[in-house]
Image (cartoon, rainbow, N blue to C red):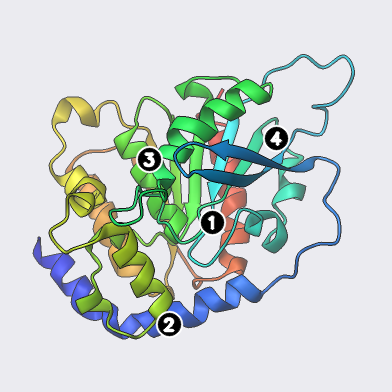
Amino acid sequence: MHTDKHRFLTKFIGLVLALCLSVSAYAQQAQPKPSLPANVENHKLNSRSMAREMPYRVILPIDYKSANNKIAYPVVYLLHGLTGHFNNWTDNSKLAEYATNYNYIIVTPEGNNGWYTDSATVPNDRYESYIVQELIPEIDKKFRARPGRNHRAVAGLSMGGYGSIKFGIKNPEMFVLVGSFSGALGAASFTDKILGNSWKTLTDSIMSVYGAEDSMTRKQNDIYKLVGEMPADKIKTLPFIYLDCGTEDFLIGSNREFANMLLEKKIRHEFRQLPGAHNWKFWDAQVQEFLELSEKFIK
């Protein structure tokens, strides 16, 4: 493990309480709306990977249901953060309103506290397999989605930022653009020794998903390790990576570190450091930036 990462991890225990407070704030910030806009729908997928029904929300282009409309649309997936759920993006931001400016199908999956990873300890918590192998093919089949890498992007906040970057690194043939807002990028390196009892929800979720400190699950899902050991020929296949983080966010250090690694490896990316903290005010603004940027990449 490199020196910068050691420095980050030693500081992390002091920042975990801030994470607890900020995530609790965004989880409670907005109450569910009494009814969904006409272009927003809830769906469920009977998942083999998860051995249960998994809910997801879809925002359709405003003309999607027009009688004469046979157009197929690109798809943008947006992942929620720790303690969040599939409805967070539309309930806590103005995403449904912003979506009316774009001809995208937007999908917000359920990730619970699973770090978008196949759990090392719970056999039916296979969140990466579920989204990559089941949900994406479901969307391509059930909706008028344009299949293929050039028509698909994924982004997320905090835990979801980590998940989206990981999906892009491990499955570069599936996404042309990936994005992270305030990403908890070092998740696979966190352990119970580092986290302690500062926030039980975080510690429990990390240990449940990644298992022991030397587990194969950690090695296979550590994005610093994946990027650091990536050969040049695979680097050329990666999607464009968008990173942003607020300068008052306790995760700014790890985001700067990851951005520096991308620079060293000459991986195409954009990193924005902007005034802001770990909250919905920041994410509401940044999802607008990501949707605008996506017009340059997805077709």
Tell me what residue is drawn at x 36 percent, y 80 percent. 16
- For marks 2 and 3, the one nearer the N-term is 2
Q: Which mark is residue 169?
A: none
Residue denoted by label 4: 102
In depth, the one of 253 and 73 nearer the eye is 73
Residue denoted by label 1: 80
- Give the percent coordinates (x, y) of residue 228: 15, 46
Q: CA distance from mark 1 to mark 4?
A: 21 Å
- For marks 4 and 2, the one nearer the N-term is 2
Tell me what residue is drawn at x 71 percent, y 60 percent. 91
Q: Nearer the viewer, mark 3 or mark 4?
A: 3
Give the amino acid at mark 4: Tyr
- Give the percent coordinates (x, y) of residue 57: 67, 45
Quarter the N terminus occupies: bottom left
For label 1, the SS is loop
Up the image or down, 157 lies above or below 55; here it is below
The furthest residue to the right? 67
- Quick one: label 2, few (<14), some, or many (20+) residues within 10 Å? some
Tell me what residue is drawn at x 9 percent, y 66 percent. 3
For label 2, the SS is helix
In depth, the one of 110 and 238 nearer the eye is 110
Give the amino acid at mark 3: Phe
Residue denoted by label 2: 18
Residue denoted by label 3: 167
Left or right: 266 with respect to 33? left
- Give the percent coordinates (x, y) of residue 18: 43, 82
